[in-house]
Amino acid sequence: MAHWLFKSEPATWSWDQMVAAGAEGTFWNGVRNHLAKQQMMAMQLGERGFFYHSNAEKAIVGIVEVIRTYHPDHTDPTGKFGMVDVKAVEPLKTPVSLARIKADPRLSAMILVNNSRLSVQPVTEAEWELILSMAG
DNA sequence: GCCAACGTTGGC
DNA sequence: GCCAACGTTGGC
């Protein structure tokens, strides 16, 4: 099973809103980047990803699960982009900040560190396990 | 099809 | 609020 990272500005869509959406989850719309689109197209039902707050907070705060695979994004007027649906699984006991990720040489290859602008990213198994352990 | 100009994102 | 990085647009 592959792992992922979803980035969101808390002002636009926060972890609290994600939790409030419950088991129904929500669609992850608004992605307008082909690389991010490719990640979403590769996602399988039941795969999990980190939920990252960008800007003010800059930390991984929770875990989400893919509950619907790639389908068209109705908010995209060009029809070129799609989205997946995700639901909140659980918060991290301790959010893992970007500063901690950057400070760990084992995480230096993370896309979050090297291409901070990509909004949907793959996460390797090793990175996934390491961040989970950092979160307690 | 190339590349310069521009807009957007996101860390600091 | 600034600026670097990156993607996209549009002229040629």
Image: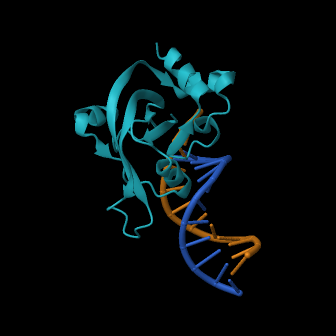
Chain colours: A cyan, B orange, C blue
Q: Nearer the viewer, residue A61 or A126?
A: A126
Give the residue displayed 28% in from the left and 40% down from the top: A25
Q: Nearer the viewer, residue A7 or A133?
A: A133
Residue that protrudes farthest toward the top in the picture = A136
Residue at the location (52% across, 15% down)? A133
Q: Where is residue A112? Give x, y as percent.
A: 58, 37
In the picture, measured across the screen, residue A23 lies left or right of residue A106, that is: left
Number of numbered labels in the structure image:
0
Q: Is residue A21 visible?
A: no
| Residue A12, position as x, y percentages in the image | 34, 45
Instruction: Judge whether A77 appears above or below A38 on screen.
Output: below
Residue A4 in view, yes or no: yes
Corner quadrant of residue A81: bottom left
Q: Residue at x 56, y 53 (%)?
A: A35
| Frontmost residue, C9 versus A125 | A125
Above or below, A39 against A17 in this view is below
Query: In the rendered image of this protein, does residue A59 appear above or below residue A93?
Result: below
Side (left or right) of A106 relative to B12? right
Residue A29 in percent (x, y) is at 36, 52
Picture coordinates of residue A65 (x, y %)? 38, 35
For residue A25, side relative to residue A55 (left or right): left
